[in-house]
Image (cartoon, grey):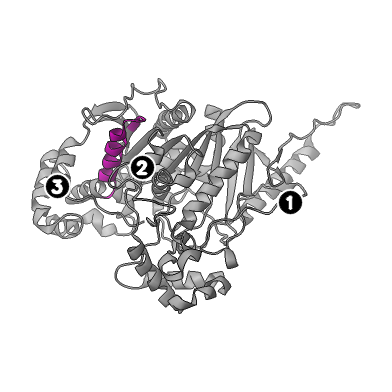
Amino acid sequence: MRTGRRSLLGFAALGLARKSLAAPRPEGKKAAPPPNVTVETHRGKVRGGLDDGIKVFKGIPYAATTDGLNRFRAPKPAKSWTDIRDVVAYGPMCPQVGRERGSYAASWTYDKDASEDCLVLNVWTPALRDQRKRPVMVWLHGGGFSAGSGSRNVFEGTRLCQRGDVVVVTLNHRLNVFGFLYLGHLGGAEYAESGNAGMLDLVAALRWVHDNISAFGGDPANVTIFGQSGGAAKVSTLMAMPQARGLFHKAIVQSGSHLEGLTPDEATRHALTFLAALDVKPTELQRLAKLPTDKLVAALNKVMDSPGAKPNFSPVVDGIVLPKGPWQPDGPAVSAGIPMIIGSTRTETTALLGANHPDYFALDDTSLHRNLVGWIPERDVPRVIAGFRRLMPSASASDLFFAITTDRRVRQQAWAQAERKVAQGSAPVWLYELDWATPVDGGKWGSPHSLDLAFVFDNVAKSEAMVGTGPDPQQLADQMSAAWIAFARTGNPNTGGVPTWPPFSSAERPTMVFNTTSHVANDFRGDERAMLASFPIYKVTR
């Protein structure tokens, strides 16, 4: 990215200024050589940089560009290179529709460059070629299956590397129509995997990790995939993909348990909507390879700006890449032996819904009832409101709205995923909830969606707009990042920094409740769960 290059030039200029003011070296003594940050990958040598002693490599291609004839197909291997390739700036993100962001996200950086040549990854490591086998933590970014990138400052792995002697990997991949436009019913075998191309990119990235990470000080036999929101949905989906078997060994799902995929018929309807906006007939799919990227993005913007229901471009249960719904009706057998952490934040929807609808923060009883229709069958709304009022007697109408919609939008899926994991009887799962409330904006957000990012990556200094200042955020980061590192290392999140965290069981249902003083609660929110149990689990559109 251009911003990354400017930063490097700024550091270089600062270094020159310091050199001019430094005392002369004693005669006969030579300056120490720069540290060796060059690594041989299976495609060629790469040269990275340093961040507070951690070796950092940005923008390494893990597969070839996906434009032209490679569109809507499985990723192809990256081309090899002969010279040393400098990898000190993030690569581009997938083209996407711009999104409005809440004020709490103002401290975080966002990519500006987009390209179909977006299959790149970034590596942070404490050391190279020291014969150590460090746990590898591969982060999958959020933004649903439609937006975002792995190159934001809150995802930088320097502090995780320093805290836990781990290797951190973040990455970009195809999203929205570039990664999930299902053309199998329209174009036949040639496009059979098109509805899951973006997930196959993630498999390609994990294969790159398997083949190369030992050269970066990591252990390819100890890889944890973790993600939040859409990234958690990607983790959930990878666990159901036979192509990913053996490429990761532990999994963490943060605020995004993804249980169902699109059916081929559903995905075909969404594809037809997009093709109509693009003015491409279903019999003219060969034209797609020749269209410029901006035409595809313009058509995507058009369908997303149109009134009414929006098309959904996300993983498809195509019988090939996804043999069945990822966690529907039960857990995927292909990953039954993978330990998991699953969790949520206390008030997910203050951000997920309230960020774009400020009126949700000023509801009265009448508007509360009206806005819950769609989340709950209308005939049941009074019963559910009354039940939550008994549990939260001092809550405002808006508080009740965010509590009920958080359960429907996020927590019911997390509970179901944990239950289905335990039912497999093959590997443990730990359940958590982040309950600490951020003080920013007068405390209006509570414990919003994405609050955990600063703590898991121990990047509170890069997240002031989200977490505020003072000692509390670092206390949360000390607990959560240590637990995530312990899980990546051993498959068990217990560290001694928090009370003993038992694995989830269907009988006691223990939950770690993270706060400045954390605690474990059995059957946490059991009354809420019982009130909503009669409703089908809400199907999330990402």
**Number of other residues with Cα within 10 Å of mark 2, as a class: few under 14, some 14 to 19, many 20 or more:** many
Location of residue 90 in the rendering, given as x and y in whole percent from the top left corner: 60, 51
- Residue 395: image quadrant is top left
In the rendered structure, which amino acid carries the disc numbered 2?
A: Pro
Give left or right: position of 231 versus 31: left
- Tell me which label, 3 or 2, sits earlier in the chain: 2
Name the quadrant of the C terminus.
bottom left
Residue 299 on image: x %, y %: 45, 73
Q: Which residues are magenta?
A: 409-430
Mark 3 and mark 1: Cα distance apart in space: 58 Å
Q: Is residue 202 magenta?
A: no
Q: Is residue 412 magenta?
A: yes
Which residue position is annotated with label 2?
A: 332
Nearer-the-camera pick, 257 or 245: 245
The answer to which image quadrant residue 129 occupies is top right
Residue 444 in sight: yes
Which of labels 2 and 1 is toward the front?
2
Distance in Å between CA atoms under marks 3 and 2: 24 Å
Taking the image as shown, residue 370 lies to the left or right of residue 336, namely: left
Residue farthest front in this picture: 189
Task: Please state which amino acid type lies under the numbered disc 3.
Answer: Ser
Which residue in the rendered view is the most extreme toward the right?
Answer: 28
For mark 3, what is the residue? Answer: 534
Q: For marks 3 and 2, give the one nearer the viewer.
A: 2
Q: Amino acid at mark 1?
A: Trp
Residue 221 located left or right of residue 536: right
- Is tag 3's residue or tag 1's residue first in the polypeptide sequence? 1
- Between 522 and 317, the residue placed more toward the observer is 317
In the displayed structure, 93 sits above or below 300; it is: above
Q: Quadrant of the N terminus?
A: bottom right
**Mark 2 to mark 1: distance in Å?**
39 Å
Indicate which disc, 2 or 1, sits on the residue closer to the N terminus: 1
